[in-house]
Each structure stands twice: as structure tokens, then as C-alpha cells.
Image (spheres, grey):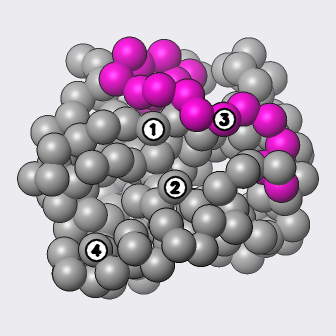
Amino acid sequence: MEIYIVFTDTKTNLAKMIKNCTRYPFSHVSLSFTKDLSQMYSFGRKETDNAFIAGFVKEDVSDHLFQRADCAVCKMELSEECYRMIWAYVQRMEREKDSFKYNFTGLFAVAFNYNFNRKNAYFCSQFVTEALAAGNIHLTEKPPALMTPRDIFSSDSMEMIYRGDMRNYPYLDSIPAYIAETHYLEAVQ
């Protein structure tokens, strides 16, 4: 089984600020259960044009922010059991999405290497790290509240399958694969 870790630079003001602090080309990371990125989740903007209304989101790569984004898509091979545990974790969060907030304070605490955890609050790389940990995948000993997209990207457990403009990602129109994977996801639920 495969999951996909998607790194993006959406070129927003917040993305520029994060990139200035991290000195890294990607400011956001998401987790996708499908190669065509139709089942992609993270913590980010709930409203495209307002960075301060944020939380758990199912992301849409056809949104204008993603269509202008630079990205890297990495594939991670998993056992079926790990995949199911991660899927169950993310689906529970989606069902309870209104109880989760964006961890703005934690995001800024990372810049000072301060492990700041807030109950039911995450930023993107913290979420991806904890979702993977739900499937017993631990990329590093670093606490999730200190993880950055760079930390996840530097893991040896992934293979990059694409780097470039999101709008040119070759699997976006992969209808047959999407249909096949959707049927599997429905069976897992």
C-alpha cells in the first residue's frame, strides 16, 4: 500500500514568512491516500483567502492556491495494517473536525525550538507526523510539535515521485486509479 506526502509552497504571505524562518522551499505538508491527491488532508486554511480561519481540512488541489504552488510529492510504501491505522486516524479527525484548531502558537514556538502542545490543535507538519505515528511510522525521535516540512522531507522512508508546479503534476487526471482507490477506501471504512 502507498500513501503520499505532499510538500507545497503556495506563495502566500504566511508561506513566505514560514520559508524565511525555516530557510526551506516548502512551507506546507499534506497527507494523501491517493496518487491523484483527491484524498489529501492537513491542517491549514478552511477559507482560501483567510489564513486565520484554519484547522483540519480535506484539501482540494484544484483550488487556486494549490494550482499556483510549487510542490514535491513523495510516495511511502506501507503495510496494509499501517495504512488502515493511518486512514482510521485521519477519518476520526475528519468526523470530529470542528473540535480541532490550528496551532498558530505552536507554529511560532517551533522557531524557538520550544515543544508547545495545545489540546486538539495542530499545524500541518505536526498533524502529518502524528498521523504517521498512528500507523507506527516514526520518522524521527523529534516530538511532533517540533516537526517541520523539512524534517519530514529528509526521511529516508519516502521516494520522491514528482517535483515542480502543482498544476503539472502528472497524476491529477488519473481517473481509473482514483476509482480503484476510492473503492478500496470505502471498503476500509
Residue type marked 1: Lys
Q: Is residue 174 left or right of residue 74?
A: right
As measured in the structure, the alpha-carbon distance from the residue carrying label 3 to the one carrying label 4 is 24 Å
As measured in the structure, the alpha-carbon distance from the residue carrying label 1 to the one carrying label 3 is 9 Å
- Are the two marked residues, 3 and 2, in contact with CB atoms closer than 8 angstroms? no
The numbered disc on residue 151 is: none
Residue type marked 2: Lys
Task: Name the N-terminal-most of marks 3 and 4.
Answer: 3
- Are the two marked residues, 1 and 2, in contact with CB atoms closer than 8 angstroms? yes
Q: Which residue is mark 2?
A: 35
Task: Name the N-terminal-most of marks 3 and 2.
Answer: 2
* Residue 73 position (above or below residue 92): above
The numbered disc on residue 162 is: 3
Q: From which residue to which does the magenta span run?
A: 146-167
Residue 40 position, x and y percent, is 52, 63
145 or 82, which is in the foreground? 82
Quadrant of the drawing holding the C terminus = bottom left
Q: Is residue 126 left or right of residue 67?
A: left
As measured in the structure, the alpha-carbon distance from the residue carrying label 1 to the one carrying label 2 is 8 Å
Q: Which residue is mark 1?
A: 75
As measured in the structure, the alpha-carbon distance from the residue carrying label 4 to the one carrying label 2 is 13 Å
Helix, strand or loop at disc 3? strand
